[in-house]
Image: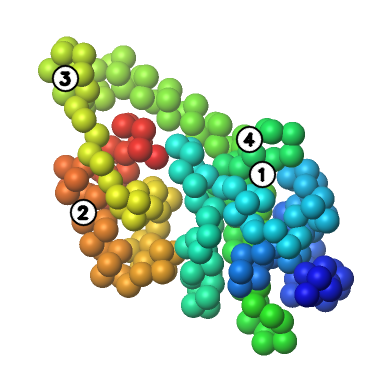
């Protein structure tokens, strides 16, 4: 078993890849089986310290509100088991030394049957991009408030108590975050490992709970109220 986990790099499904991105792969139990030099460079974690450990413990990815995306049987693994790749996504993780960094992750699934089941993760540091987007979002909100164009209920502002934000279930929050990432209903269903009609029902409940009429309005509402 130990030999399989620490197979030489030349025996990996991505041995012929040349990339600046970090690379790691996991098996069907979500254990890390390969860890590239570039992954060590970007995250500061050595191969011998992470191989054989669950990826969700090593990476610990979460969103801007500290919602844990990396977990046992995550949507990425569930989709991979069905032979479906997951669209690119951003996660926040804590690297060696305690620094938080945003990573953009792409997923690949080898089709050649000669390899054991593996899910390849390719990632790059997008911390600067996320900080720029966050600054632009906050600046835009401040400007709209200054110009009186934020569309908020002036009565609630006068009373000093903003309207309550509806509570969403875990699946509804996942659907909302994927909507904000620009995914279609089919892509959301694929990512969550559910049928399209189920994903559509999640989205409909989100719209109803937020009191909006469109997906774009839902994303704007969620951004303004700190849901995403």
Mark 3 element type? helix
Residue 178: x and y, percent? 40, 53
For the point 54% across and 72% down, which residue is it? 80
In the rendered structure, find residue 205 and report the number of the disc placed on it. Answer: 2
In the rendered structure, find residue 156 and report the number of the disc placed on it. Answer: 3
The residue where tag 1 is placed is 125
Mark earlier in primary sequence (3, 1): 1
Q: Nearer the viewer, residue 7 or 23?
A: 7
Mark 4 element type? strand
Residue 142: x and y, percent? 37, 19
Q: Is residue 93 visible?
A: yes
For the point 81% across and 70% down, which residue is it? 2
Q: Relative to 121, is 228 above or below?
A: above
Mark 1 element type? strand
Mark earlier in primary sequence (4, 1): 4
Report the residue that reaches farthest toward the bottom. 113
The residue where tag 4 is placed is 100
**Contact, mark 2 vs mark 4 (Cβ under 8 Å):** no
């Amino acid at each position: 078993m130990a030999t399989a986990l620490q197979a030489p790099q030349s025996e990996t499904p991505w041995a012929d890849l040349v990339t600046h991105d970090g690379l790691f792969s996991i098996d069907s139990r979500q254990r890390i089986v390969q860890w590239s030099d570039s992954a060590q460079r970007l995250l500061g974690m050595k191969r011998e310290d992470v191989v054989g450990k669950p990826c969700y413990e090593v990476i610990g990815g979460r969103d801007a509100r500290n919602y844990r995306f990396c977990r046992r049987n995550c949507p990425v693994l569930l989709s991979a088991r069905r032979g479906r790749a997951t669209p690119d996504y951003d996660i926040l993780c804590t690297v060696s030394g305690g620094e938080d960094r945003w990573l953009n992750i792409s997923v690949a699934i080898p089709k050649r049957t000669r390899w054991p089941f593996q899910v390849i993760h390719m990632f790059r540091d997008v911390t600067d991009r996320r900080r720029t987007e966050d600054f632009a979002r906050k600046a835009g909100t401040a400007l709209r408030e200054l110009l009186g164009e934020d569309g908020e209920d002036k009565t609630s502002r006068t009373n000093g108590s903003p309207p309550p934000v509806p509570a969403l279930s875990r699946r509804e929050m996942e659907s909302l975050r994927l909507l904000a990432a620009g995914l279609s209903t089919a892509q959301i269903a694929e990512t969550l490992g559910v049928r399209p009609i189920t994903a559509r029902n999640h989205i409909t409940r989100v719209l109803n709970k937020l009191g909006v009429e469109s997906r774009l309005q839902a994303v704007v509402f969620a951004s303004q109220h700190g849901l995403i």
